[in-house]
Image: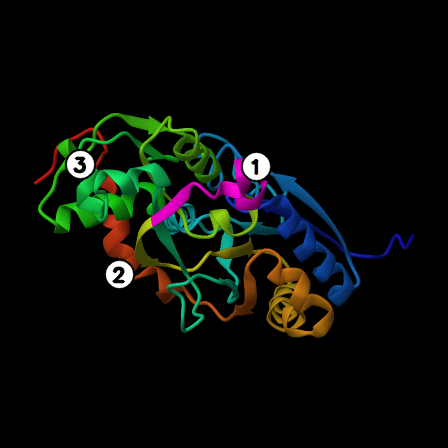
Amino acid sequence: MSANKKEIRVITYMCPTHPVQLYELIMSALEEALDCYTCLQYESRSPGPFKDRPDPFATDKVDLGFMTAAAYMRLRESSNKSIELLPVTPVFAHQMNVEKKPGYYSDVIIHSDKKGHNVNTLLDLRGCTFAYSDEESLSSSKIVLKTLKEKGENASFFGSKLRSGSHIASAQMVLSKQAEWAAVDSTTLLYSKKFMQDGGKDITLLETLGHLPPYPVVVRSKLDDKIKKDITEALLTLPLTIKWKERFAKFGVLRFEKNRDAAYDGPATQVWSVQSEKLNIRYY
């Protein structure tokens, strides 16, 4: 064991939306490409750094991070100087992503039994019990509120509302009929559906909302510039090689592409601007 090898400290806030094995795979790829060690912190309780705790990037606890777009946009809005957007992001497979672009969607899902009750569109779900991961989520809350508002609806559209705590939990609630519908991150079921009861066969995709902004990959701003560049190059190139392509495809990752801060402006800002809207407050 070499004492001179650099260690890259990684944190992911994306589990259980994404399986932790995906981030372990990214670590393995980085170790090979950069001839370094990596270690992983797994934080499933928050979509990004906790608001009421010391920032792990500012306190030099982590070097590389994976978080939700909503969490990154919150940090950007607060002019956080301890992180920097790495110009790279994963591209996930989805039936709507025919152009294979970065970003993701919100999948509106129902139990297959609902199809027998003339539920064919989002508006047919008025008064039904809704499961969502949390109110800050772009895919489970904000895009739903924005879409309903555009259709002339308000928060009275919802029946009971169940905060599940994660997209996986929302899907499980639909499967077990605790909830009649949910909006989940479109990448949630790519890998995990097969582990659900009967392979999740009773989950039906009703509609897809979005396109939502790319998943941000961030680094500690004071990290050595060469390491930032090497991480970016490794992620852009390794998943395209024969050795790594199939391993990433297992998680629905087609490749990594370049990303930039402008991706979180425009339409992304319009979704983010629904900050004042709440699932239990009527809006007009």
* Residues drawn in magenta: 193-205
Q: Is residue 157 depicted above or below 70 in this figure?
A: above
Please tell me which of labels 2 and 1 falls first in the chain: 1
Q: Which mark is residue 164?
A: none
Q: CA distance from mark 3 to mark 1?
A: 34 Å
SS label for mark 1: loop
Specify the amino acid type for callout 2: Pro
Q: Quadrant of residue 234?
A: bottom right
Please tell me which of labels 3 and 1 falls first in the chain: 1
Q: How is the image coloured?
A: rainbow
x, y percent for residue 181: 32, 37
Mark 2 or 3, closer to the camera: 3
- Residue at position x 43%, y 69% from top? 101
Specify the amino acid type for callout 3: Arg
Q: CA distance from mark 2 to mark 3?
A: 26 Å
Label 3–label 1 contact, CB within 8 A: no
In the image: residue 217, left or right of residue 269: right
Is residue 130 one of those drawn in magenta?
A: no
Q: Which mark is residue 126?
A: 3
| Crowd class of label 3 (few under 14; some 14 to 19; many from 20; radius 10 Å) | some
- Residue at position x 34%, y 37% from top? 113
Is residue 203 one of those drawn in magenta?
A: yes
- Residue at position x 23%, y 55% from top? 270
x, y percent for residue 145: 22, 43
Q: Is residue 120 visible?
A: yes
SS label for mark 2: helix
SS label for mark 3: loop
Disc 2 designates what residue?
A: 267
- Residue at position x 25%, y 42% from top? 275
Disc 1 designates what residue?
A: 43
